[in-house]
Image: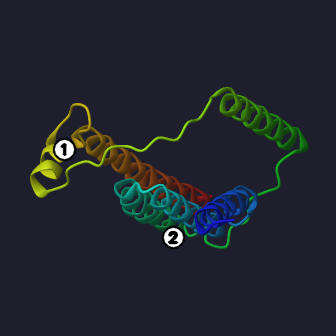
Amino acid sequence: MSLHEILFIVFSTVVLLFSLMTVLSRRILRSATYLLLVLVATAGIYLWLQYEFMAAVQVALYAGGIVVIIVFSILLTHHIHHRSKPFPPVRVITGLGVAGLGAALTIWAILQHDFHYHEAEPLEVNAKVIGQHLVNTGDGGYALPFEVISVLLLAVLVGAIVVAKKDKANEQTSENK
């Protein structure tokens, strides 16, 4: 077994293990921490595939941005030690069924595809080419993805504020009673 295969096994194991821990943890702050580890391991897979830009975006945007916003929203709502209630058995069974169906569909789609490896031609990389790709909205451009990312971060920030305000309003209502 080569180092290349060992790295894939390690990264994919970390992603699977901490994904399960994210979903199964009853403490919200621990779930956010496990999610951070999943996103960092996903960046490791991107590095393993030699997609350095995607790895940097994964760490900067998702691991760095969204998880920090989620943690701040948890801290703002003062529910750090909050434990979620166990799910009813019907929801657990439904969730497992949907997850199994999704896994079966994914495995079926992968097995239907005939994967072939081929070497890609190396691209010219210099500051001018990178700059043109950053401002280009067409094929191979990054302007549109950056705009989508900025809207996503704005939505997460607004969501975090709404969650924090909603809990403060509920606390004030319960104090007035």
Name the front one of labels 2 and 1.
1
Query: On screen, 61 above or below 92?
Result: below
In the rendered image, the quadrant that contains the C terminus is bottom right
Residue at the (70%, 67%) spot, across then down = 27
Few, some or many residues within 10 Å of mark 1 (<14, 14–19, 20+)? some
**Disc 1 residue type (three-letter):** His
Query: On screen, 119 above or below 61?
Result: above
Frontmost residue, 164 versus 144? 144
Proximity of marks 2 and 1: CB atoms separated by less than 8 Å:
no
Query: On screen, 134 above or below 81?
Result: above
In the rendered image, the quadrant that contains the N terminus is bottom right
Q: Earlier in the sequence, mark 2 or mark 1?
A: 2
Please tell me in which quadrant of the rendered image residue 78 appears.
bottom right
The outermost residue toward the top is 112
**Disc 2 residue type (three-letter):** Leu
* Helix, strand or loop at mark 2: helix
Q: Residue 167: image x %, image y %?
A: 54, 57
Residue at the (42%, 63%) spot, across then down = 59
Disc 2 from disc 1: Cα separation: 38 Å
Please tell me in which quadrant of the rendered image residue 83 appears.
bottom right
Q: Residue 163: image x %, image y %?
A: 50, 53
Q: How many marks?
A: 2
Residue at the (26%, 42%) spot, across then down = 147
* Helix, strand or loop at mark 1: helix
Q: Residue 133: image x %, image y %?
A: 19, 44
Residue under label 1: 133
- Apparent side of residue 50 relative to residue 108 in the rendered image (left or right): left
- Display colour scheme: rainbow
Residue at the (30%, 41%) spot, across then down = 145
Residue under label 2: 75
